[in-house]
Image: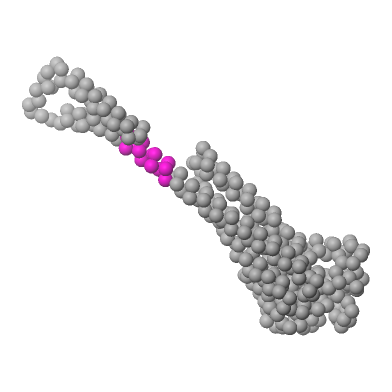
Amino acid sequence: MIRSFVFSEGKLVGRDLEVEALRIVRADKGLVLWVDLQDPTPEEIKTILEGVFQFHPLAIEDCVSPTSLPKVEDYDEYLFLVMHAVDFTQTEKFSTTELDLFLGKDYLVTFHRAKLKSIDLAMDRCAKTSGVIARGPDRLAHSVLDLLVDNYKPVTDELRAELEVIEGRVLGEDTTKDLIPELLQVRSEISHLRQIIRPQRDTVNRLTHGDTKMIRGVMLPYFRDLRDNLIRIDETAATYADQLLISFDLYLSRSDFQANEGIKALTALTALTLPATLVGTWYGMNFEHMPELKSPYGYPSALIVTVLLTYWMWRWCKRRGWI
């Protein structure tokens, strides 16, 4: 699907143009063009990226093939950025969707396979605002990236809620449930978040130095603010990773403690039954001459000895804290 917006002096003057109209607008240096490609067909990719804008084949290849890490490439006439947004259809598991941006002097081209909330919100604002929206494509790019970063907040909030639930279970009374799968899942999500945020922070940081002519000086403070937001998200994710590590250590320590308590209980049970086992084993043997068997005090004496030894063993286990 191809969507497009045309701006003149920062105001929206046209949208969803045909391919030939896009070529005409592309040739008019007084207009700003934003073209969005959402899950395009190979024909649409070839028509827009190769035909209308004539991007470098390597940049087009990076667009078509998924890229695991964000990056920025300077092709002199435009910037090529690879960013990652939170999946619009996310339900339970944290996942991201790649967003590619071509930023030129008078155009912005966005490319993504899945539906993105940041793109839809930015386009909705463009369609509903009657005044000045963006006097340059760098403003449009910042709006998209700013919304992209804002959509990470629900993810961090969800991770924080999951950590609180895990901490409550680790410190709670009911420890029969195995928390290892949940701990590993949250650890994987936090690791994924940090792997995405850190390169994006570095990518945006390169845009704040003013080394590229595609970003005007007036927009540099806005991109620096965007970088600061990514730094905060990265620091938050690092804090969550530390909290998860502490919870994991507490869970393992508590599991070891419970295992030791179980071993103590079994040891105490074995110690308490040892006197009766010894006496019973002794009398269970076949002796040819055993005077106490003929004595009327034989069995009572054996019973008294068993009770005394069992009591002494109980006191000994009690002093050691086994029971």
Query: Would residue 20 be found to the left or right of residue 270 on screen?
Result: right
Q: Is residue 152 above or below residue 262?
A: below
Q: Which residues are magenta?
A: 256-269
User: Which residue is drawn at the image coordinates 86% and 78% (left, top)?
Assistant: 22
Residue 296 shows up from this direction: yes
Q: Quadrant of residue 271?
A: top left
In the image, residue 167 above or below residue 108:
above
Main SS, magenta residues: helix
- Rendered-image quadrant of the C terminus: top left
The residue nearer to you, when weighing 142 against 44, is: 142
**Residue 226 image offset from top left, x and y in percent:** 72, 64
Q: Can residue 18 be seen by looking at this rendering?
A: no
Give how far across and how far down residue 24 sits, in percent. 88, 81
Task: Please state, as top left, top right, bottom left or bottom right, where the N terminus lies in the image.
Answer: bottom right
Is residue 263 on the magenta stretch?
yes
Q: What residue is shown at x 72% (from left), y 71% (from top)? A: 208
- Tell me the quarter of the picture where residue 217 sits: bottom right
The single residue placed furthest to the top in the displayed view is 296
On whether residue 103 falls in the magenta region, the answer is no
Q: Nearer the viewer, residue 212 or 99?
A: 212
Does residue 111 sit above or below 155 in this rendering? below
- At 69% across and 66% down in the image, what residue appears? 227
Reply above or below: 279 against 59.
above
Residue 84 placement (x, y as % from top left): 68, 66
What number of labels is visible? 0
Q: Residue at x 18, y 20 (%)?
A: 301
- Please say which color scheme the image uses: one colour
Find residue 163 and report its horizontal and vertical position in percent: 59, 49
Near-viewer residue (136 or 282): 136
